[in-house]
């Protein structure tokens, strides 16, 4: 028997998936706008953030309606609860992509030390984490969740290393300060992107397994 | 598009010296589900029964105000009550099937309204039972006593029976309150389906039910219409404090 509720849930899922795809592309473009020093791409990311915000509001309204009118329980309840949180994480990812796009416009050309940073490695991990977190949500795959959560450690390590290096550069020469500060910020933002991907993955785990694995305290227990 | 089906203006109902409804004005929209909620004794059922003039069966009934369906005043002297009730079907809290076969229950009203041929009757019955999502369960049992069906099936049969005379409006007074959750869900799905063709007014004590299936909700209290809103608005941000108190369970 089809439930009226399923119709609304499908609508919610469709919106979230569309928002996911948009946010995923926003991150890709933002990262490219730095690598390629592409101002047009940066402007596109900045202007499209308004669309992300619209999705955010729409999805929040749908969730509010579902709570008020359908009193979801069990899996349905977890899905709507998590949809709300995934939604805010996606919205934050969108904001961070916008920030990165803004920062890409702050330099005339890439500094000569750029190749010594782990930029492509870090951005590869971030993009991969976001893609996998989204895929985990779409396919209800709790195995992908573990992959995302593990990648976050590697990401944090690389960001830490590069941040340290950037500080050294600033100590070395005053001329490095401007660009190094921007890169320092960009790396912090990339690290935050990874955190948001992890949050989404944790929400997926909650939907599928009904277990909260936030703040890492339980994941080890899950595996044992 | 919103089209007004029933226009009620300044309706007050009295049973002897008791006033059951107090100056109620409300527009009921076509092909929508309108839920009527409120505590016991607030006038919900009296309100519902005034739309197919069933209150007149009670002695001491008086009314003021007017009820227009498609622009026609149903309390006009020239209105034939039998035809009115053909247009405005009703389903009650407890199924009220006749202790006869399923077939006899279903053909009763069409026969009363002049359909004689078996073929035609069969077509009507199949069509309405399909609409009421009960055809598959009863098609091989038409000669069985209707009271042998389960409570949920009996209730859906009552809905099918109400549809046999092709009404425009369905009044439902607590149609699922005596049923288990599965049968309730079936009735709710059915109501959702039926609103494509019928304007439905549903009296319910179950606020969650009102929230789930209605498009509009009217909250009655002590004979007054306190708030009438889109259901989404009513259950997310009601305008009136009394409504808020009632739907959140803080009443009294």
Image (spheres, coloured by chain):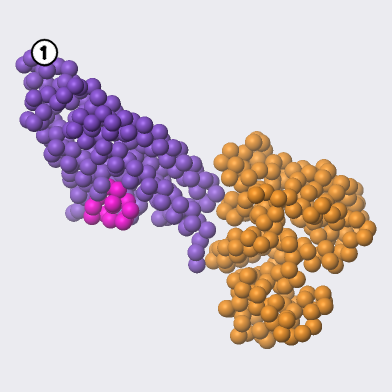
Chain colours: A purple, B orange
Of A21 and A61, the residue lying toward us? A21
Image vertical order of residue A158 relative to residue B159, above or below: above
x 61%, y 77%: residue: B135
x 60%, y 71%: residue: B133
Could you say whether the residue bearing mark 1 is in a helix, strand or loop? Answer: helix
The residue lying furthest to the top in this view is A174
Span of residues in magenta: A133-145
Left/right placement of residue B180 relative to residue A82 reads right
Image vertical order of residue B192 relative to residue A215, above or below: below
Please tell me whether residue B34 belongs to the stretch shown in magenta: no
Subunit ID for the residue under disc 1: A
Give the residue at mark 1.
Answer: A174
x and y, in percent, of residue A118 in the image: 11, 34
Please tell me whether residue A138 belongs to the stretch shown in magenta: yes
Q: Quadrant of residue B225?
A: top right
Image quadrant holding the C terminus of chain B, namely: top right
Of A201 and B206, the residue lying toward us? A201
x 14%, y 34%: residue: A119
x and y, in percent, of residue A116 in the image: 7, 30
Left/right placement of residue A175 relative to residue B225 reads left
x 82%, y 78%: residue: B114
x and y, in percent, of residue B58 in the image: 87, 60
Image vertical order of residue A198 relative to residue B205, above or below: above
């Amino acid at each position: 028997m089809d439930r009226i509720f399923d119709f609304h849930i499908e609508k919610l899922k469709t919106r979230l998936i569309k928002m996911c795809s948009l946010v995923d592309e926003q991150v890709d473009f933002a990262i490219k706008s730095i690598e390629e020093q592409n101002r047009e791409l940066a402007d596109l990311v900045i202007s499209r953030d308004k669309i992300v915000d619209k999705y955010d509001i729409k999805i929040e309204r749908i969730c509010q309606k579902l709570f008020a009118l359908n009193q979801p329980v069990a899996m349905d309840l977890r899905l709507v609860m998590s949809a709300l949180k995934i939604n805010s994480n996606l919205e934050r990812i969108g904001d961070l992509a916008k920030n990165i796009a803004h920062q890409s416009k702050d330099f005339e050309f890439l500094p000569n030390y750029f190749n010594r940073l782990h930029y492509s490695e870090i951005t590869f991990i971030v993009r991969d984490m976001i893609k996998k977190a989204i895929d985990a949500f779409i396919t209800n795959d709790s195995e992908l969740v573990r992959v995302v959560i593990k990648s976050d450690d590697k990401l944090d390590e690389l960001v830490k290393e590069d941040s340290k290096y950037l500080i050294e550069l600033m100590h070395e020469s005053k001329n490095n300060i401007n660009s190094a500060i921007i890169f320092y910020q960009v790396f912090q933002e990339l690290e935050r992107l990874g955190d948001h991907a992890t949050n989404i993955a944790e929400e997926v785990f909650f939907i599928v397994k009904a277990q909260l694995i936030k703040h890492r305290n339980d994941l080890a227990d899950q595996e044992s | 598009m919103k089209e007004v089906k029933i226009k009620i203006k300044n309706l007050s109902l009295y049973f002897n010296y008791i006033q059951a409804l107090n100056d109620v004005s409300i527009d009921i929209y076509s092909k929508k589900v309108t839920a009527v909620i409120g505590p016991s004794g607030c006038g919900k059922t009296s309100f519902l029964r005034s739309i197919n003039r069933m209150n007149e069966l009670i002695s001491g009934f008086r009314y003021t105000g007017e009820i227009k369906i498609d622009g026609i005043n149903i309390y006009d002297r020239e209105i034939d009550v039998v035809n009115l009730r053909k247009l405005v079907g009703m389903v009650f809290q407890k199924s009220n099937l006749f202790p006869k076969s399923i077939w006899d229950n279903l053909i009763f009203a069409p026969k009363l309204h002049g359909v004689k041929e078996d073929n035609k009757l069969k077509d009507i019955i199949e069509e309405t039972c399909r609409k009421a999502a009960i055809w598959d369960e009863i098609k091989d049992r038409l000669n069985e006593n209707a009271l042998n069906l389960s409570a949920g099936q009996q209730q859906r049969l009552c809905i099918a029976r109400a549809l046999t005379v092709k009404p425009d409006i369905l009044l439902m007074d607590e149609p699922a309150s005596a049923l288990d959750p599965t049968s309730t869900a079936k009735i709710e799905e059915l109501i959702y389906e039926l609103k494509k063709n019928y304007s439905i007014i549903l009296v319910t004590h179950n606020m969650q039910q009102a929230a789930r299936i209605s498009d509009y909700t009217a909250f009655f209290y002590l004979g007054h219409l306190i708030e009438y809103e889109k259901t989404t608005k009513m259950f997310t941000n009601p305008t009136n404090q009394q409504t808020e108190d009632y739907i959140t369970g803080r009443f009294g």
